[in-house]
Amino acid sequence: MQPASISYGKDTTVIAPDDDDDDDVEEELCPGTSTVSVSGPASTQKKRKRKRGDIGGRVDSEEDADKKKKKKESMRPNYFISIPITNTQISSAVTQVQEAVLQQEPRLARAMIPVPTLHITLLVTHLASQEQVDLAATVLAEAEPSLAELLGGRDLVLPFSGIGHFRKEVVFVGLAPGQHRHTLDSLAALLQSRFEEQGLLQEGNRGFEPHLTMMKLSRASKLRSQGMKRVDPALYSNYTNKFFGDQTVERVDLCSMLKKKQQDGYYHTETSLQLAYCS
């Protein structure tokens, strides 16, 4: 998958991975061609192109593709480590932008991220059994001393400012630059390393680019058939440089993508590590 372009405002563009929590990625089967020799008169040898499907190859390739697809689906991420957004100033500002966009384009209603689920994703993974879920919870808990050392007795405060997008398909609130970004990167890298050590993180886990998603076209698949394949940045241009607020990192959660959400609207949380205890 090619990396997506993130745009902030009119002038700045950086490269980052796609949004992490529920992308639908399917392997595309591309039958190739092979060249074979055909016997003819003694004086000539002709070559022709033959598709795989000419002699049973198509059946084999379809079966292989089906197996690959099933394996890929069985390994799709179903859990993630997140930092929840608990500052009501940020959630209120996100609501303000969403409502402003909907006043101009009501069809985007289903593309809006529910405000109670706002979070930063630190990593995504596939946990195949309750044993792996329990192991992940243990890994998170055992990371506490290292996180305490990383934070050095100080709160990690994340200032959210500006609006960006991934290929105009995902719209998000950006994280302002500063030392907090380096600390957050180190926190994410530490947790990813611990999960990898226990075999809980698949190879090729996408890089970390912190952002706060508030719109995602993949949530409203019917829009594509209606001709809407992008979110026009003009819809939120009045908020491009808006300051959304500061989020103190209070805890890190191990959340399920698939289980029923909690009463407060947030993802089902298996366990949490209170970072207040670390600092």
Image (tube, helix red, strand yellow):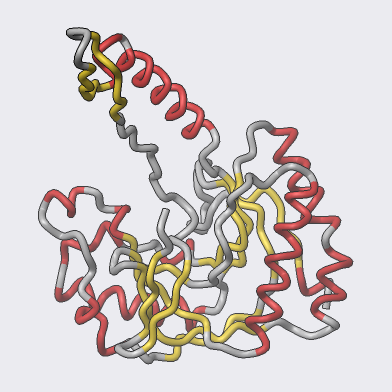
Rendering coords of residue 156 (x, y %):
70, 81
At x 22%, y 24%, the residue is 49
On screen, 269 above or below 128? Answer: below
At x 49%, y 34%, the residue is 72
**Image-based side of 72 in relation to 172, left or right:** right
**Image-based side of 227 in relation to 205, left or right:** left
Rendering coords of residue 129 (x, y %):
67, 31
On screen, 94 above or below 66? Answer: below
Outermost residue, front direction?
Answer: 43
Rendering coords of residue 54 (x, y %):
24, 13
On screen, 71 above or below 209? Answer: above
Rendering coords of residue 20 (x, y %):
49, 57
In the image, 67 versus 249, the foreground residue is 67
Outermost residue, left direction?
Answer: 226
**Image-based side of 69 in relation to 106, left or right:** right
Q: How many marks?
A: 0
Q: Quadrant of the C terminus?
A: bottom right
In the image, 267 versus 67, the foreground residue is 67
At x 20%, y 16%, the residue is 44
In the image, 44 versus 8, the foreground residue is 44
At x 63%, y 81%, the residue is 181
